Amino acid sequence: MTDITSQTEAALAAIAAADSLDALETQRLDTLGKKGWVSLALKTLGGMSPEERTAAAPAIQSARASIAEALETKKAALEAAALEQQLARERIDLTLPAQVAPKGSVHPVSQVMDELAEIFADLGFAVATGPEIEDDWHNFTALNMDETHPARAMHDTFYFPDKTGECREILLRTHTSPVQIRAMLDQGAPIRIIAPGRVYRSDSDATHTPMFHQVEGLVIDRDIHLGHLKWTLETFFKAFFEREDITLRLRPSYFPFTEPSVEVDVGYSTEGGRRVVGGRGDAPGHAWMELGGSGMVNARVLEFAGLDPAEWQGFAFGLGIDRIAMLKYGMNDLRAFFDGDPRWLAHYGFSPFDQPTLSAGVGARA
Amino acid sequence: MKFSLTWLKDHLETTATVAEICDALNAIGLEVEGVEDPAEKLSGFRVAHVLTAARHPDADKLQVLTVDTGEGDPLQVVCGAPNARAGMKGVLGLPGAVVPANGMVLKKSAIRGVESNGMMCSVRELELGEDHDGIIELPEDAPVGSDFASYHGASPVIEVAVTPNRPDCMGVYGIARDLAAKGLGTMKPVAMPSFAAEGACPVEIRTDDPEGCPAFYGRVIKGVKNGPSPDWLQQRLKSAGQRPISLLVDLTNYLMLGYGRPAHVYDLAKLQGAVVARRAKDGEEVLALNEKTYTLDSGMVVIADDVQVHDIAGIMGGEHSGVQDDTTDVLLEIAYFDPARIGATGRKLGLSSDARTRFERGVDPEFLDQGLDLLTGLIVELAGGTASEVVRAGSPPSDAKVIAFDPGLTARLGGVEVPEDEQKRILESLGFTVSADWQVTCPLRRHDIEGPADLVEEVVRIHGLDMVASVALPRVEGVARPTATPQQKLERGLRRAAAASGLNEAVTWSFLPTWAAEHFASDQPLWVLANPISEDMKAMRPSLLPGLLMAAKRNADRGAAASRLFEIGRRYFRGQDGLSDEKPTLGIVLAGEKTPRGWQSGKAQGFDAYDAKALALQLLEAAGAPVANLMVMGEAGAQFHPGQSATLRLGPKTVLARFGMVHPATLKAFDADGPIAAVELFLDAIPPKKNAAFARAGFTPPALQAVTRDFAFLVPSALAAGDLARALQGADKASITGVRVFDVFAGQGVPEGHKSIAIEVTLQPGESSFKDAELKAIAEKVVAAAAKLGGSLRG
């Protein structure tokens, strides 16, 4: 009896003293292992008579239980200490730089085109497109710009030496207006479209590039008048600039493709060297800035586009996309739009997740 | 068009301020481009009285004046002008005033030790003329102390942009008429100087080209004395930006600028025989007043005598018969030329002039006699002489357009209700006549009026565009309907997917230098401009890559470590019927460092062909292309590295994309440092999604877990890994759901001419788990499939 008690005490002391998992394992083998003295003692119970067994078993069982528990407890403690040591070893310097994923961007022209599409979709306008390499019939003739119109001159318009199968001159479209003609010929009336895209003029200086972007708007129906044009432009600009104080001034003007023709000015002020749209142009500290041309579609244009002017009428407008992009987002150099400089693109470009939506506001704030 | 307020008030009785006039001009479609008030330049200059003049103690040529400025004590002023003397009145610039001619700010100073409190000014110093011989001498009655600007009658000058449809407003009179219609005042009758015409015109006048020159009126004035023009005339011409030349020339300019009516004055002594409007002979030459010689052709109208051409009709007179200071007898010409022919002639000769601008847009056919009388009267009044009767050849157009107008159209088209009597008033004040049943007769000068819409414009612009109320466009019930086409949605989605992949969207020129376009043309005929703005912008791009490569090169030259650029735009090809075929395309260029050197990643790494492949596949997937079915095939094009580029095809013919490393020769041509990877996605080739419904095909994740098996095959070196993977994928279509190459090895342990490819095959059990026999059977099929391609299982 005393044997087991003293053996147990010795074992428990050894377990407590074990300083590693290996040392602990040695103790386990010595006690509870196949050849450990506890296991051997337990085996002796099988050869005993029931009386002897009843007398001897409790002590052995008890020794086994207390040793097993001690082993378990010690093991957990040693493991915890080992883990702690391991974690201490695994410490890293998190001030070191992490890998940086490149950040992409959407070009301001594309962003503004998406904004245009979103706003005008709400007003029922679809987006139409047409070729950039056009013929002079669509670009000039059908827009009531006859053979002698000055815009046809070589110093304004880029020409190709080729002719179409119908012997028309081939040129780079000078405006998005030919898309009007194509859309009316294709779809007839009523029609509501905008047509954004690249246009080309033989012009290059600090504020003009030979390629730039325009958006054309066209509404043809039975009873569309100048008041609708005014509302459409006002509504668009308020939505685009997200300002209620946008004030437009319409001035009579002349374009061959519209009658009456109207030039559109917007009031602005200059703040910190930048033009900020809003307010009346004749208010103190304000001025008017030309934004684009518009008017009621000339009856001749409707005829060229296969519509009966006695039945259909409507308006058209044209705006410079690069220009309104610059006004809204504060760029001041048009040439930089076409340079592909990643520094500029990262600064003035937009996150892919700035998808314009009406519910979030079509604009992306800086 | 520039004119002074004074000039405007010659024709318009008005009390309106300059600001009100400018607002009205803008409102009626005569855009104000600027207002310049000479009074501002002359502020600080006063009418002054010289009280005493004494010699400067230290300078022979200077005098010391005491000058009364109308207030306070007289000022002491040092003056060098020989005509400065006691008792005279002149113009004194006070300290602080800025001398208009040279921008000098006047200040109190000492001149040779004598204090001077300002400067007595010459005509030239105040930019009022060329005279600099002495200081300005003002008349006795000039009010001392008054502001010189107001004494001098300096008048604000307004510059307006006249749209090409309104030649009737290319004279001050026409502008006054529009302003009067707007209610800014009332028109004054034209002051016609009286003269007596005596005797028939001694010169025969003819028009031999009634189409090009329907009317040619003339008159001779004998005994004129040419010379400088009077001040009122000089002031008006200067306000319009014209330099006064001589009385006879200035008066024709006055008629043109004041009434929009060009005329010409010939020196009669230089003319011989009949003066005739005719077509030029091919090759005929004329030395024009701008001292250039022009070679004419038979499409052009000229005025000629028996000997030579004296005038390119309606555009510019000839040097030979132009009036001189000693001219005494003149022939006046006032004519009507066909506008289209004037325009064509001017364009052909590359010659513009104030006269051409007016004639080609259309002058007033009703203003020939009156214009001629006005010019004659002014010449006789100011230059003397005796005028003959008028001689007229031909007649100007006289058929007035009559438009049946419905005044209700103003509201229907113009969007504003204007009472009928107001519409009538507006039209009549612009010179239209309106009958009781609204037949509107147009004045002949209004060449721009074609139909009822033009009359609406007249009514609305005078009534006021600001009176047009905004009216909402009718809208469909409910929320707005989607409008974007599949192509538009594709481009929008791709753009944002590309940006989300770390690429910066660029917009580059559609035109390229010809060499760059040719480099990428791949034998397709290019579109090359006939009149490019420069050689660098000449040929339309057949690929998006050249523009992006050039941008990447610029960026590298600027020290950029990397360019990850993409662009969505068109490539321009030849289409049917001589038209263009413009293909929507996405281009990508990856240049410079993909990863910079780093404490983790080691050396900086460039982009490789697999970066390009990954982007191509990722974006094609975003575009909805069936990426799993694509084949990687060679031939990305000569601009790419032949061994490190390929196309992605749907079937052998439909190329959706090309990608890979840019060919060293291309890099050299673009002077760019490599390696550069590039991708081009051909958006028009991507098939539209087939299933347009919202609901997806039914799907439940399989209940049983997939198992993987690894195989390593020895295959001939030339075998493409993709071909092996494809073969394995097809070995047991029911069970094999995935095949992935995870190792490729050649070298030690692998026989010469071979490589080892390790592939993980994913097997998906159906209803019940695979049994060992089934797995063994599948493995055998996999090995057999590899064997067909020359692969053997690696032991």
Image (cartoon, grey):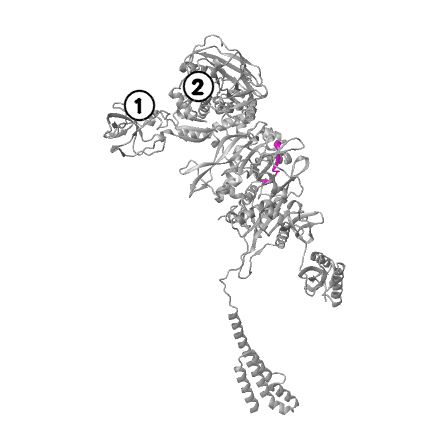
* Amino acid identity at mark 1: Glu
Give the residue at x 47% y 10%: B388
Q: CA distance from mark 1 to mark 2?
A: 27 Å
Residue with the most extreme top position = B199
Q: Is residue B496 magenta?
A: no
Q: Residues within 10 Å of mark 1 (few under 14, many from 20)?
A: some
Res. B234 mark = none
Please, what secondary structure does the residue beneath circle 1 have? loop
Q: Magenta span covers which residues?
A: A125-137
B727 or B298, which is in the foreground? Answer: B298
Res. B137 mark = 1
B483 or B318, which is in the foreground? Answer: B318
Q: Is residue A131 magenta?
A: yes
**Above or below B711: residue A223:** above
Q: Position of residue A131 (x, y in %)?
A: 62, 38
Specify which label sits upstream in the sequence, 1 or 2. Answer: 1
Q: Are marks 1 and 2 on the same chain?
A: yes
Q: Chain of mark 2?
A: B
**Above or below B433: residue B101:** below
Please, what secondary structure does the residue beneath circle 2 have? helix
Q: Position of residue A274 (x, y in %)?
A: 44, 42
